[in-house]
Amino acid sequence: MIRVLFFGPVADRVQAREMQFEYTPGLTLHDITARVGMQHPGALSIVSFIAVNQNQVHDKQLALHDNDEIALMAKFSGG
Amino acid sequence: MIRVLFFGPVADRVQAREMQFEYTPGLTLHDITARVGMQHPGALSIVSFIAVNQNQVHDKQLALHDNDEIALMAKFSGG
Amino acid sequence: MNEPVRIQEADFSQDEEITALKAGSRRMGGIATFLGCARDFSEGRDVREISFEAYGSMALAEMKKLRTEAIAKFGLLDARIVHRVATVVAGDNIVFIAAGAEHRAAAFDGCRWLIDELKQRVPIWKKEITPQGESWVTPHP
Amino acid sequence: MNEPVRIQEADFSQDEEITALKAGSRRMGGIATFLGCARDFSEGRDVREISFEAYGSMALAEMKKLRTEAIAKFGLLDARIVHRVATVVAGDNIVFIAAGAEHRAAAFDGCRWLIDELKQRVPIWKKEITPQGESWVTPHP
């Protein structure tokens, strides 16, 4: 299972805090973001950062592993 | 009367916190520092700032007035 | 003693944070701090409340990395970072950073770097609640 | 409420100073502070105590001028300066500066300018008491 987390402005647009996708061998980060984007293009348009297991990643071709936790995040505005 | 004040390292060298000089018309700041310097050359050598009535002055030709308060000060080390 | 890096709902005391910061070293000559507070307006709009949301586990991990990096990069003796995740009103504390060093230049440089990096790297989002409604804050580029 | 610019023997509370600083404005988004503390050694010598002496009336007048200048120069909403004149030991507070502004850049710039100028312009002298004796501190050029 792959968990995808949403926070703040992205969660508002997705109207959910989490989605789950079945893990299949060979699954990439791009596969996941594409699926989210199909369902919620308006949410994906404000995604500026992606984290996998709480580390920022830039390469969407990254191969995922079962139980990975992905976060699709808008620009931060803390502080 | 002209009061001359000493603090910190200057006071230690003069071994006094205050000296008084009689005011005479035409008296300048230079006249005062020269008198202090004659008595305490070691103290004058560490004087970096001079204030008259609590304002720093740079012109030793400044004409003094009766009751002026002069401070002969070493480099500051507050903070 | 509280942890030096925290995300919490409750307010914090600067006196307590500074006491904790100092406790580790008698060589600390300068401590620079930054306190971010809620303002009552933002870009011309009245702001009634500000609420925060965090990706808690990642935010805390990033803040701990920031502290470690700042200590190494600026030669700090210690540093602390506290960020509230709560709903706050004008005047309330939001974030506190303290950087202690032997001398003031490193303390100032480290403190400023920490708040600048925190804003860039820590997954926390701010929502402003105004009389006209709510909106997520879009950071300036 | 305490005066925003003070010379005093007693210690001070950062929480109280910050509360007083904030009281004047609901637009304050960033507060930078600097706290100078006594260190237990200086240039390789153990320092047991540090004692301060001030030309009190002039020092206070200069500190008030610094505050007014900083508020104008950096567009601060408020600023506070407290300097102790006392005998202190390692870890004790010596000087506190707080600068509040709408945004953090002005707060940091104003705070740093204030401590830099204070060291240049305020007639206060520091004596270090070491096991080898006492000596007045000569500031670095």
Image: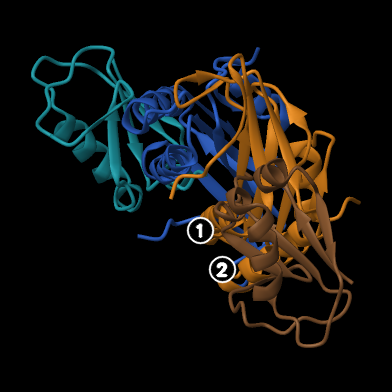
Chain colours: A brown, B cyan, C orange, D blue
For mark 2, what is the residue?
A: C74
For mark 1, what is the residue?
A: C109
* Along the viewing direction, whichever of C115 and A21 lies nearer the viewer: A21
Q: Residue at x 58, y 20 (%)?
A: C40
Secondary element under disc 1, as helix, strand or loop, is helix
- Where residue D33 appears, x then y in whole percent? 57, 40
Residue D92 quadrant? top right
Residue type pointed to by label 1? Asp
* Along the viewing direction, whichever of B34 and D26 lies nearer the viewer: D26
Residue D23 quadrant? top right
Identity of the residue furthest to the front in this view: A38
For residue A55, above or below residue B42: below
Q: Residue at x 58, y 41 (%)?
A: D52
Crowding at mark 2 (Cα within 10 Å: few <14, some 14-19, many 20+): some
Q: Residue at x 80, y 49 (%)?
A: A17
Secondary element under disc 2, as helix, strand or loop, is helix
Is B55 placed left or right of D87 in the picture? left
- Where residue D107 appears, x then y in whole percent? 47, 37
Is A71 placed left or right of B43 in the picture? right
